[in-house]
Amino acid sequence: MSPTAAPTLSAPGRPTQAERRARSRSALLESAARGLSRYGYGNLMLEEVAREAGYTRGALYHQFKDKEDLALAVIEWVNDSWMREVSEPAEQQPDPVAELLALARGLMSEPTLLLLDEPSLDAAGTGHPFDRHRPGAGRPEQQ
């Protein structure tokens, strides 16, 4: 579909293709976040991610080209969620103490946002995509 073409309307009550795609992407990202938290990057099995999300491996590959692409999308999703649900509301607080309290409450209420601090990610070993996006990660001589 060209960028100027009108989106296809679906029957009333029936989700559009874009809505179905967004729903499947979200379910796959949530499943992958749980898998990364539990097993680490090295032990993450894409078939298990898809199954837990309620989709096929083909649906996963329709959304993400490979495990690295999925893992990087999870990082972006977690960061976007943090900004939208915790950081931006905290910045609206009237003073620094209230902002800090709002950040702490948000951190405790959003367990998915703790994903990048999970020990299993560090135990996955060096060379996984997270290492390229965290300064000094996976390189003990620089820590």
Image: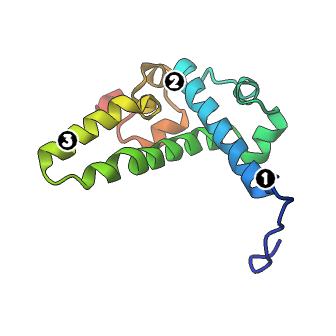
Q: Quadrant of residue 107?
A: top left
Residue 48 at x, y percent in the picture: 72, 23
- Where's residue 87, x and y in %? 33, 48
Question: Residue 23's mark?
Answer: none
- Give the answer, above or below, for where 38 lies relative to 41: above
- The spot of residue 121 in percent (x, y) is 48, 25
Is residue 51 or residue 118 the one in the foreground? 51
- Residue type of the residue flagged with mark 2: Ser
Give the labeled residue for mark 2: 37
Q: In the shown orientation, is residue 79 left or right of residue 90?
A: right
Q: Quadrant of the N terminus?
A: bottom right
In this rendering, position of residue 85 left or right of residue 102: right
Q: CA distance from mark 2 to mark 3?
A: 26 Å
Reading the image, the residue beneath label 3 is: 100
User: Mark 1 is on which residue type?
Assistant: Pro
Q: CA distance from mark 1 to mark 2?
A: 31 Å
Residue at image location 76% in from the left, 25% down from the top: 51
Q: Amino acid at mark 3?
A: Leu
